[in-house]
Amino acid sequence: MTPPPPKPPRVPPLQPENRRIICPLSPAHIAGFAAFHLYTIFLFVDVRMAPIPLIAFLLACAIAPFLPRIGFFLPIVGRGKPGEKGVALTFDDGPDPEVTPLLLDLLDRHSVPATFFVTGERAARHPSITRDILSRGHAIGNHSYHHFPFLMLKGIRTLRREIESTQSLLAGFGIVPLAFRPPVGITNPLLWRVLLEQGMYCVNYSCRALDIGNRRIGRLSDTVLKAVSEGDIVALHDVAPRHAGAERLMAEFDTLLRGLKEKGRVVVPLHRLIGREVMRKGGSPGEAHPAALFYDELAADYDREQFCSPVSFVRKTEYALFEARLPSLFSPSDRVLEIGAGTGIFTLAIARCCREVTAVDISAGMLKILEGKAAGEGLTNIRTITGDVESMDMGRGYAAACAFSSLEYLSDLPTFFRRLADRIEPGGTLYFVTARRSLFRLFAQIGNAMRQGLWLKSHSRREIKTMLSASGFVEIRVTSHLLKSWVSGGILLEVEARRRIDPGIPAAP
């Protein structure tokens, strides 16, 4: 008698603080906005043309989910990063007791890495195979719990349950997948929000065998070898064939691996090809902050983007403001806290002027770049800490604290300022540059929401002064900069304040 399928594990509720900043705007939102306005315009121009934009938008919404590399509803990793050599092999729908062990042996013989997008139900049924995948050095991604082919037609509660249940289950194997592949590669408008809540991203493929879940494996290897090119993510399946034995499937896989070698296509781990972690060892599901994943991916190119892209004028202005204030901000005996240090654009200059810098950032990848820069310059007075400043222990006894375009990510700035005041010595300095609320900044916020799925907060001068004053800061000076005109008072706020010597304000925990 076949045992009943394992029940999905209970999933703890999502921590509410992550939901406050999530704002998954996508090209679909912009297309819908444009379609509605074109419809309105055509009503006054030619009523017969009015439905055309709406029909076109609905067609795009209906077709886009079936195009695995089109990020119409959310960003999709569909192939390797530009310039990356090699191909990555991925296997969906397993683990399968008939196929996966044979496949693991085959991959060992060819010394080839792979990524297995497993379903929660099968991983629960076959825990020893799941552990074997990991012990042999392969990666595991999330492929939903039950693998409903039409999962994306269901509501957001079902979508959350399918993804979160698999995350909780796989955490029992000591890993937390960061990559999710939707069943059949189909996406929907709700998926990005659920992935952001879990600190995950979507991975599809650019080359597949057209095997229909191993229902058709004849000439599988030929199909892939004819289509594969550098940078491809190849989608295969490690489930038992419907009309052939596992040995026949292994023969096709073996031919494929030999053919890739003959064509000079080197099989590389998926994480190397796409420049992003596929899974993390240890930790808890849902703890990865969306900003951390975004900046981990961007870390290697961050400095170039900040100073060589069309929006670099913002960062250059910010750095010029910092340079002008640097001589008077820090002294050689100071311990300084930098919030959102990133790759060390400001950290190295601060470290040359003070005794010690504690550089805090949510992205381990960014801090690794910072550490490399510090080592290259022989700076030994920089201490890095990875974590979320809204909840982590930042230490105490700092003579000064600073932040540069990072406070926008915080969900509760008033509470953070109260916590920060308790970390700065009485009479100590707080200096930061942050986004000023304005019409120009609104467009930047929309663009960021489309790119990161996060709404970066901006504030007025009055709000900043009120929050700092309530947190025990005095001598508050707030000046606005950049793109100042009759329609805008600038898009950056430069702020300097001192902690009251006798604060009289209870610090936040």
Image (cartoon, grey):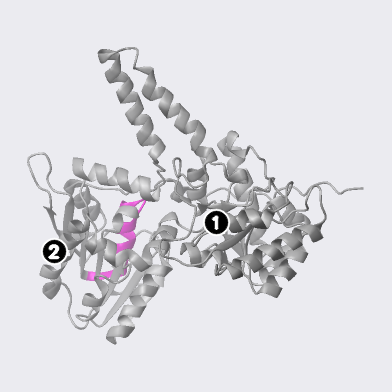
Q: What amino acid type should be assigned to the residue bearing mark 1?
A: Ala
**Which mark is first along the chain, 2 or 1?**
1
Does 308 lie within the magenta span?
A: no
Inter-mark Cα distance, 1 to 2:
39 Å
Residue 259: image quadrant is bottom right
Residue 293, image x and y in percent?
44, 59
Q: What amino acid type should be assigned to the residue bearing mark 2?
A: Leu
Would residue 324 appear left or right of 192 to someone viewing this image? left
Q: Label 1, on which residue?
A: 179
The circle drawn on residue 321 is: 2
Residue 399, image x and y in percent?
24, 74
Relative to 490, does residue 114 appear above or below in the rendering?
Answer: below
Relative to 51, does residue 424 appear above or below in the rendering?
Answer: below
Residue 356, image x and y in percent?
28, 80
Q: Say if residue 464 shows up in the picture.
A: yes
Q: Nearer the viewer, residue 382 or 93?
A: 93
Q: Residue at x 16, y 67 (%)?
A: 322
Would residue 351 appear left or right of 289 to someone viewing this image? left
Residues in magenta?
410-426
Q: Nearer the viewer, residue 237 or 8?
A: 237
